[in-house]
Image (cartoon, rainbow, N blue to C red):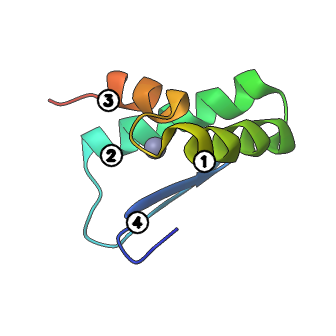
Amino acid sequence: MTEDTIGLTLGYGIYIKQGYLTRRLLSHELRHVHQYEQAGSHEAFLTRYIGDIIRFGYLDSPYEVDARYHEINI
Ligand SMILES: [Zn+2]
């Protein structure tokens, strides 16, 4: 998380920087909730998420690609 971070999901907790709430961002973060559920535990999700960020970079990490794919842009 950096000062540029505007959204963060930890399990069922979604944190959005004040003034940045949009349908698109919320749908992105809700997809991360789904990913947490599919991973089975916070530890399983975060281990894979962080490993993928290191391996592929933030934009190309599979969880981020998937979350962007499921964004609602209306
Ligand atoms: Zn994301």
User: Which structural element holds mark 1?
Assistant: helix
Q: Quadrant of residue 44?
A: top right
In the image: residue 44, left or right of residue 68: right
Amino acid of disc 1? Ile
Residue at 40% x, 37% y: name it: 28
Viewer-nearest of labels 4 and 3?
Answer: 4
User: Which structural element holds mark 2?
Assistant: helix
Q: CA distance from mark 1 to mark 2?
A: 23 Å
Image quarter of the C terminus? top left
C-beta proximity under 8 Å, tags 1 and 2: no
7 relative to 23, above or below: below
Residue 71, disc: 3
Which sits earlier in the primary sequence, circle 4 or circle 3?
A: 4
Amino acid of disc 4? Thr
Q: CA distance from mark 1 to mark 4?
A: 17 Å
Which sits earlier in the primary sequence, circle 1 or circle 4?
A: 4
Residue 54, disc: 1
Amino acid of disc 3? Glu
Q: Determine crowd level at label 4: few under 14, some 14-19, many 20+ residues with C-alpha closer than 10 A.
A: few
**Residue 19 placed where, x, y %?**
25, 70
Residue at 70% x, 34% y: name it: 36
Please give the residue where the numbered disc 4 appears in the rendered image.
Answer: 5
Q: CA distance from mark 1 to mark 3?
A: 23 Å
**Residue 15 placed where, x, y %?**
51, 61
22 relative to 55, above or below: below
Residue 25, disc: 2
7 relative to 66, above or below: below
Which sits earlier in the primary sequence, circle 2 or circle 4?
A: 4
